[in-house]
Image (spheres, coloured by chain):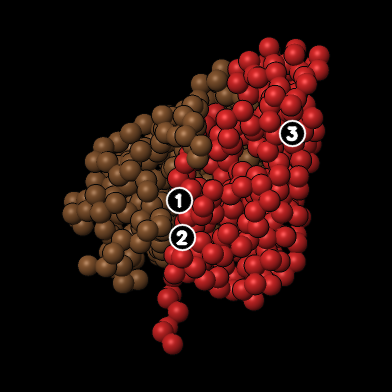
Chain colours: A brown, B red
């Protein structure tokens, strides 16, 4: 057996799949696609899947012509320059709207900030949109357990999405739900280069893994909806751990956001 | 020559260095450390370096006892529960403060959101703090040109930092400055899975690379201040391209933030 290298390293592989359709078994599609690329899952691998194919497989495609907008949707669609049927869906999906810019209503949806409640018209058939997975953690859990059963491997699974950051141009990754891994690691109690104890640092490991995956995924029609990360220091556990969220009071951004 | 694999993939290597001190030639330290790990730079590699060692090498260490706080610092230090000398430095460093929570003043510094103006007490000697590099893009450029001269390779260099995201727990990566690469790629004009043209999507490639690097870097005393990414689809160019920033009016977060 070769010596372990004395420095940390990891590898990432984009997984090319056929177009994912409603009702598809996404775990099966990924295992098959991986095999075609000459790869198999190993213990401690992390699999990142984009939310849009996960939601599509789960039947979260909605035909806009089937939506009857209410009065509130009419008003806000004009304010934020959005399709009134999409605005109606945003209202149905989100926990809260607290502002927006032309083309985007800023919402909290399923506990996380999401422009337009995460509703996506790209990578959906003409006239349709894709809603976020109903519960991304459960989606990740289902896919993880299916892979575990078929491949006898313990891996972590992340359902990821893209988000913009405040005052930054361009999309980065965010983990909507994870299964089989520790999504946020606590560095409190560790020590810095000078031996001083670290006090408040936590690492958003799952978010970082999604951002890394986005380097290979692309946003458009590349058909790379999933990425395998091998050798990452993420802690794989045979369990579902909730994504810990900041309370609104603790969050330095939110506590300075006033409802528009 | 082996066939190119038919799927995208990349590799990342953490670079372990000795402790970086003021006046150190950081390019040299990194080349030497890489060599000890049995690695050399190749064309199109991306090198990500944490801002703290870059700033330290540039002499941006400040002894807190040398700082004489003004009245404004006294007032805000109490409001945000910060060391009054650090608060004075925050005021000197930042473009603007627009709120905060206990332990963190929310600022815009050198154009990007930065708690406490990016001033860092961790990984600094006792009684000292590290300011952000004076100009992270210039720092990245100097390091890139030094590596190009010594190794005859065209690489991209990113000076990265960590940030929290709104309503999320844990730190992700952010690129403070880049050189030799396209930091934000424009996906407008490309097509989605259904052949519809993408309209507003941009990829924050540099931010995603820093987030990926943070998987191997750690936040505390791991002495892995730099990461080499090989095989990423980032576009390496022999030039310095400014980090494009959203205007405050365009930003859906900022346009909903009111000064506290």
Label 1 SS: helix
User: Which label sits on residue B13?
Assistant: 2
- Viewed as shown, does residue B185 lie left or right of B111? left
Chain holding disc 3: B
Residue at mark 1 to residue at mark 3: CA–CA distance: 28 Å
Which percent across, then down, holds residue A245? 47, 28
Is A100 drawn above or below residue B41 in the view shown? above
Which residue occupies 22% across, 67% down?
A1
Label 2 SS: strand
Same chain shared by disc 3 and disc 2:
yes
Q: Disc 1 marks which residue?
A: B216
Which residue occupies 27% across, 68% down?
A2
Is there a contact, CB below 8 Å, between mark 3 and mark 2?
Answer: no
- Viewed as shown, does residue B212 lie left or right of B260? left
User: Which label sits on residue B108?
Assistant: 3
Is there a contact, CB below 8 Å, between mark 2 and mark 1?
Answer: yes
């Amino acid at each position: 057996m070769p010596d372990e290298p004395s420095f940390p390293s990891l590898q990432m592989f984009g997984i090319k799949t056929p177009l994912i359709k409603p009702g598809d078994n996404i775990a099966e599609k990924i295992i098959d696609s991986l095999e075609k690329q000459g790869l198999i899952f190993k213990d401690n691998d992390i699999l990142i899947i984009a939310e849009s194919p996960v939601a599509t497989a789960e039947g979260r495609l909605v035909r806009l012509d089937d939506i009857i907008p209410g009065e509130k949707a009419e008003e806000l669609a004009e304010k934020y320059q959005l399709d009134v049927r999409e605005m109606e869906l945003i209202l149905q999906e989100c926990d809260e709207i607290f502002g927006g810019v032309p083309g985007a209503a800023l919402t909290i949806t399923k506990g996380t900030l999401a422009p337009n409640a995460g509703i996506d018209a790209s990578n959906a058939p003409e006239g349709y949109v894709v809603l976020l997975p109903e519960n991304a953690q459960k989606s990740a859990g289902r896919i993880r357990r299916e892979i575990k059963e078929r491949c006898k491997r313990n891996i972590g699974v992340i359902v990821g999405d893209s988000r913009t950051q405040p005052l930054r141009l361009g999309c980065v990754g965010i983990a909507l739900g994870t299964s089989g891994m520790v999504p946020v690691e606590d560095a409190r109690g560790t020590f810095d280069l000078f031996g001083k104890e670290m006090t408040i640092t936590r690492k958003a490991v799952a978010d970082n893994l999604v951002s890394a995956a986005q380097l290979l995924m692309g946003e458009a029609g590349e058909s790379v909806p999933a990425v395998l990360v091998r050798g990452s220091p993420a802690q794989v556990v045979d369990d579902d751990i909730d994504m810990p969220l900041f309370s609104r009071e603790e969050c330095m951004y939110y506590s300075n956001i006033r409802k528009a």
